[in-house]
Amino acid sequence: MSLFSIFHVAGSAVSAQSQRLNVVASNLANADTVAGPDGQAYRARQVTFQTVFMRQAGGDPQATAGVRVAAVGEDAAPGRRVHDPRHPAADADGYVTYSNVNAVEEMVNMIAASRSYQNNVEVMNTARTLLVKTLQLGQN
Amino acid sequence: MLQRMTTQFDFHAETLRLRAERQRLIASNIANADTPGYQARDFDFAQALRDTTQDLRAPGAGGAGELGSPIARGAALGSTTAPRLNYALAAQPSLDRNTVDMDRERASFADNALRYEASLRFLNGSLRTLTEAMRSHNGA
C-alpha cells in the first residue's frame, strides 16, 4: 500500500530536518565560544542530506525516496579574530579567535529547516486523512 | 454475474492505486526538497491509467468469460507494471542540481489528495448503490 510508505518517507525527512535544526541550535549556542573541548575555537557544523531509496514490492525502486543525514561536516572558514589583549584566551599578538559561526546564515538555515519540517508534517497529515477515509470505504 | 457487478469497481480501484502511488512519489519529492542533486520525479497519470485499465476497457474482456475471467483479470490487474517515471524539469535551476519545485509539488500534492478523495467517493457511491439494490428486496 503506497500510502503507508508515505509515513516512512515523510518520517525520514522530519527526522533529518530535526537533526538539521539540532545542528543549527548548537551552532547558535556556540556563536561566541572562544574554545571548545579541544582548546580550539568551535567550528560551525553543517549537515549533508542524502536520498535513500526505499525498496517497494512491485514498483520502481526509485519511486520511494526518503532522506537521511549522510554526514555532519565542519565549516572550514577561519574563526572570527578580535583584538583583546586582556582576554585570558588571547594569543601572543593579543588576538582572541572566536568560532566561525555566521549567525545570519544559521537563522536562515533554521527557518528553512522549520519550513521543510512543516511541509513534511502536512504530508503525513494528508496521508493520514486519506487512509482514514479509505478505511471507512463502504461503511455508510 | 457477480464480477459483472463489480467490474466498475476495478476501474476505481485502479485509479485509487495510481493516485496513492503518485501521492507517495510527491511525498518523496517533498521529503527531498533540500537534498543536493535530487531529481524530482512524476508520472503522467492519464497515460498510466490508460495503460493499466486497457484490458478492462477492451471489448469483451471484462465480462467475457464468466467462468475463468475473474482469475485471469485479477492476474492482469495484479501484474500491472509500475507507471513510467519521468524527471521534472526545474523551473528555476539551483546550484546544488536539486530540481524539486516546492510550489509545484505542494499544488500537485493537494490536487492529488483531492482527486484521491473523489475516487473514494465514486467508489463509495457505487458500493452504496449496489448495497441499496440488494437491501430493497428484503425490506418493505
Image (cartoon, coloured by chain):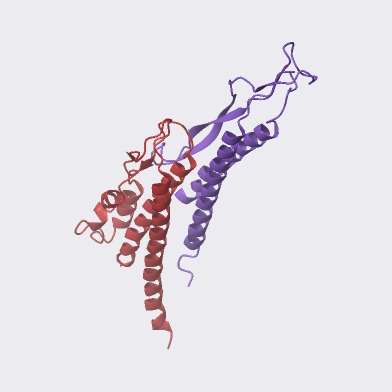
Please indicate whether residue B136 sits to the left or right of residue A78 in the image. left
Q: Residue at horizontal 51%, vertical 43%? A: A9
Tell me the shade of chain A.
Answer: purple
Snapshot quadrant of residue B84: top left
Q: Residue at horizontal 38%, vertical 53%? A: B19
- In the displayed structure, would residue B71 be above or below residue A85? below
- In the displayed structure, would residue B116 be above or below residue A78? below
Snapshot quadrant of residue A88: top right
- Of the pair A134 and B6, the residue shown nearer to us: A134
Expressed as whole percent of the image width and height from the top left, the position of residue A120 reads: 52, 47
- Of the pair A1 and B98, the residue shown nearer to us: B98
Tell me the shade of chain B.
Answer: red
- In the displayed structure, would residue B136 be above or below residue A84? below
Snapshot quadrant of residue B7: bottom left
- In the displayed structure, would residue A52 be above or below residue A128? above
Expressed as whole percent of the image width and height from the top left, the position of residue A33 reads: 72, 27
